[in-house]
Image: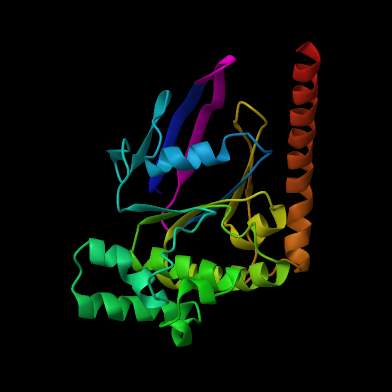
Amino acid sequence: MTAKLKVDNVSKDFTGRNGKLQALRDIRLDINEGEFLCIVGPSGCGKTTLLNIIAGLENVYKGRVVHNGEFINSTGPDRLVIFQELGLFPWLSVVKNVEFGLKMKKVPQPRRRETALKYLDMVNLLKFKDAHIHELSGGMKQRVALARAFAMDPEVLLMDEPFTALDAQTRDMLHDELQKIWQETGKTIIFVTHNVREAVCLGDKVIVMSSQPGMIKTEFRIDLPRPRHIEDGGVMDMVRPILKELSFEIKKSFEEEYDAKKDN
């Protein structure tokens, strides 16, 4: 199978106060169409940097990213990012927030309203379509952001720890809804998280990144039936080996940071 998106030997350096810092080293990754990829790793390992490179928000130092045979060197409507900060507009109603990107693309009003209502229905927010953002809970705001993203019909959806600030019950509900929308739309999703159980619950594939510089240490295929829930026995069985790999990298990262502070 030809990869939908290919990260080919990508490295990324930053220059800071203490000189050059290598954030990513020799990342090689093939992502197939319709695949749900989750990325875990210790803090500072370059997960978000990798996501930004795929989005076209940052340039590579070495290597290339190819999407549908084209080199990525800028942002594009085929790749859409959902950040932790959702960027919803408090002065617009829920439905107008979902319509906003379609309006910027000059989609006719009747069609964009139809599309917005379709995705609000998919995230169970149809009855809140005329509410304003300040009237919603954190989980409802996240569902508005999901509806807005899917309404734009990107080929690849990039999600950077979108559920981190939510309580466990709301997060579990959003796991269910995201799996449902993903299965219905067949979108390619790349999802960054610190939560291994979340990664196993959502992903077809989970990659563990090493401590800095970020490299792909291990790749796990998740062949479990859907829909999945965090408390499922099969999910917990897969979590253990992934958590073992991640815990080693977190410990290594702490030790490196401690040694660096001693040297200073």
Q: Residue at x 43, y 37 (%)?
A: 53
Q: Residue at x 48, y 81 (%)?
A: 125
Q: Percent position (x, y) of residue 6?
A: 41, 40
Magenta extent: 15-34
Magenta residue check for 44:
no
Q: Percent position (x, y) of residue 77?
A: 30, 53
Q: Would you say residue 166 is visible in this rendering?
A: yes
Q: Would you say residue 226 is visible in this rendering?
A: no
Q: Residue at x 75, y 24 (%)?
A: 257
Check the image and report above or below for 207 versus 211: below
In this view, the residue in front, 179 or 250, is 250
Q: Which quadrant of the figure contains the C terminus?
A: top right
In this view, the residue in front, 115 or 130, is 130
Magenta residue check for 31:
yes
Dividing the picture into quadrants, the one containing residue 106 is bottom left
Check the image and report above or below for 175 versus 192: below
Q: Is residue 31 left or right of residue 223?
A: left
Q: Residue at x 78, y 30 (%)?
A: 254
Q: Is residue 223 left or right of residue 256?
A: left
Q: Percent position (x, y) of residue 192?
A: 57, 49
Q: Is residue 9 left or right of residue 138?
A: left
Q: Residue furthest bottom?
A: 127
Prevailing SS of the magenta stretch: strand
Dividing the picture into quadrants, the one containing residue 208 is top right
Q: Percent position (x, y) of residue 42?
A: 69, 38
In this view, the residue in front, 75 or 196, is 75
